[in-house]
Image (spheres, coloured by chain):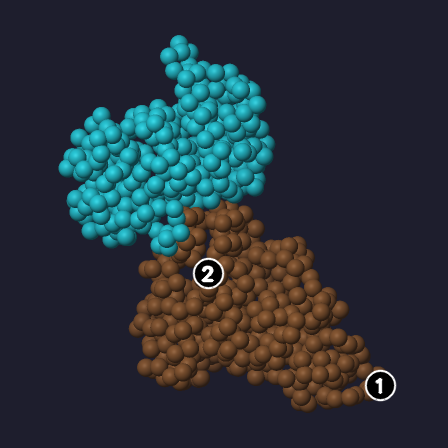
Chain colours: A brown, B cyan
Amino acid sequence: MTDLLIKSADLIGKGRTDVLVRDGRIAEVGSISAKGADTVDADGLVLLPGLVDLHTHLREPGREDAETVLTGTRAAAKGGYTAVCAMANSYPVADTAGVVEQVAALGRAAGYADVQPIGAVSVGLEGKRLAEIGAMAHSAAEVRMFSDDGHCVADPVLMRRALEYVKTFGGLIAQHAEEPRLTEGAQMNEGAVSAELGLPGWPSVAEEAIIARDVLLAEYTGARIHFCHVSTARSVDIIREAKARGAKVTAEVCPHHLLLTDEAARSYDPVYKVNPPLRREADVAVLRAALAEGVIDAVATDHAPHALQDKQCEWAAARPGMLGLETALSISVLALGGPAGVDWDLLAERTSRAPARIAGLEAHGRDPRPGVEANFTLVDPAATWTVVPEDLASLSRNTPYAGMELPVTVQATFLRGRATVLNGKIEEETTE
Amino acid sequence: MKHLLTTKELTRDEAELILDVTEQMAEAVTGREVPKLPALRGRTVVNLFYEDSTRTRTSFETAAKRLSADVVNFAAKTSSVNKGESLRDTALTLQAMGADAVVIRHPAAGAPQRLTEWLDGAVLNAGDGTHAHPTQALLDAFTMKRRLGGIEGRTVAIVGDILHSRVARSNVWLLSKLGAQVRLVGPPTLLPKDIEGWPVEIGYDLDASLKGVDAVMMLRVQRERQNASFFPTANEYARLYGLDERRLALLPDHAIVMHPGPMNRGMEIAATVADSPRATITEQVTNGVWVRMAVLYLLLTNGEAR
């Protein structure tokens, strides 16, 4: 493999430098002249450690009409990601070593981003008995994170056991916090807008009650817990207090909860239907502040592709979820006060380093220095782009940002030194 | 007006125009040997009903026929809907058949609005989930106008299951727009959360809320709601929120009693109250046909052929 020289990149917003890549790893950082190396002119571009997504629905196996590991990881690369954690709600469910190994193998074959499978907590996501968590942990996929995402682990006994059980291999449970009895039939955030639209309300307390309970269970068992897609201001309060007490709690927020509100439901267009639902303006403001402050550790996309017919229908009939991988970076920049004057180091922390730490992905989320794997992305901080659903790399089209002009474009993404995206375009040959 | 989806989107002028045209429709057909006008001859009105509602469907059908329109009943039960055809595909089919107006009743809030994205013709909301039922509110307003001499400055209590009521929502927006004071009365379990911004007074005590009203509108309450603990028993509900003879006596002498139907006699309304001369329930049904004639006429002719 020829050496790769990145010329004059702004290294995580800290100043211009060159970066030399050899054999998939960073060889040198500084002022470099390397004859014979492939050179990428990064003048005006910011170099960030490759983004890491804690929460991706790749839909394979089972719903290959909505997304595949290949198309989903192409979308990830296009969005600046070098690693994604694949949620367990495939068909069949990723609740056995066989399924998680299959997903990991598909990721390796695709070659666009590292795919770390998340295992199910319970058999079939049914919330009744533990899946073979140990078998998944000790499989070739080396699963560390377990989640019934899409469903809450509502049974407190099952949650306690899961939290205790994963301690044996330093694992963690990622909870989809939603008390199911409080959200039966729920369609959107419960509040002034749902009252007017006549759509059954999804009370914020359904999330907060589970987060409060699980913080207590995690403290009681001494286990690690991670909260998926935190969406309300009170959830942030509970997590802040738990962290102050020293509980082993981490949390993620989705881009859409940092930008959109329940007002979007007035169109009755289910492209805005998502679980947890879009909340109020006041929640958005608190979530943004919590992300900047670090109460919320990471941005996670909850990238949820859906086939056209599952969105071109009545609101109540539609599946919840929206695309996120290709827009997350831009929206994270906005949420952290950008594009002008955005703190790139903070952005790298919330979109790359912290999620890599939470997921235990040691080769990702690393700032470039000699010896570390060359997983990084080059972004143009001055550019803007307009979201056109048909132009997205994802197989699905359910983006809530269609027609929106967003800041920052991804110019290139490198996975172990090989370009997955170059000049803003997906590279077709990626096999390592 | 291209469609009629909610009363919230109507301007006061539009609402008053509909009520004026309703009056004209009533005058034009009342007492005629053949109660029929030629206004919509050659136009096709499709009734697309995804919920059983013989009352509303028949009312729309009668209204369209009195305007000489061709009426097609596309009931979900007898169509391919049960075989899983999507609303969008049904819309494209109706579009291809050349429907001039589609009257839709659907259990999902917002379905009529979705339909407007897939159809060129006029869409008329005949009730969508717990969202809106604009022609019901218009016929209620028309009934009040006739019985009370006007709406401006009148006080109306809407009582019962506000949470699940599209009728209540549509009346709140329309009546407040027309200058009425609206009181919503029911147990807190059956009132939507966060409605402090609505142009209404909210009360939990029916006796107190009946003081000085010009009209009281009783909403249908499903007995099954007790299974989800919205109230303990049907009996307790009737005691606390039912309109019985004792409560009828609390009303001012001129006040009227309304109900959108179908009624649960003995639950939200006592049989004697429902049958009393102060009840406008059958009148509302008659007025419903005229209101629907007015709306179909206005949507399909832009009022040009008057």
Of the numbered discs 2 and 1, the one sitting upstream in the chain is 1
Q: Nearer the viewer, residue A138 or B184?
A: B184
Picture coordinates of residue B10 (x, y %)? 48, 38
Picture coordinates of residue B111 (x, y %)? 47, 42
Q: Is residue A246 left or right of A397 when viewed as pictured?
A: left
Residue A395, relative to residue A240: is it above or below?
Answer: above
Instruction: Please name the residue shown 49% across and 33% down the image.
Output: B13
Label 2: chain? A
Picture coordinates of residue B110 (x, y %)? 47, 44
Q: Nearer the viewer, residue B237 or A271?
A: B237
User: Can residue B177 be seen by looking at this rendering?
Assistant: yes
Of badges 2 and 1, the one in the foreground is 2
Q: Is residue B294 left or right of A58 when viewed as pictured?
A: left
Picture coordinates of residue B42 (x, y %)? 55, 19
Residue B179, relative to residue A17: is it above or below?
Answer: above
Instruction: Please name the residue shown 21% across and 31% down the image.
Output: B253
Residue A35's disc number: 1
Instruction: Please name the residue shown 64% across and 54% down the image.
Output: A403
Q: Quadrant of residue A36?
A: bottom right
Q: Please identify the quadrant where the N terminus of chain A is shown.
A: bottom right
Q: Quadrant of residue B122?
A: top right
Residue beneath disc 2: A279
Residue A386, relative to residue A252: is it above or below?
Answer: above
Q: Secondary structure at mark 2?
A: loop
Label 1: chain? A
Q: Please identify the quadrant where the C terminus of chain A is shown.
A: bottom right
Q: Quadrant of residue B180?
A: top left
Q: Amino acid at mark 1?
A: Lys
**Tally of numbered discs:** 2
Q: Nearer the viewer, residue B207 or A296?
A: B207
- Work out how far the residue at label 2 is from the one at label 1, CA to CA, in angstroms: 54 Å
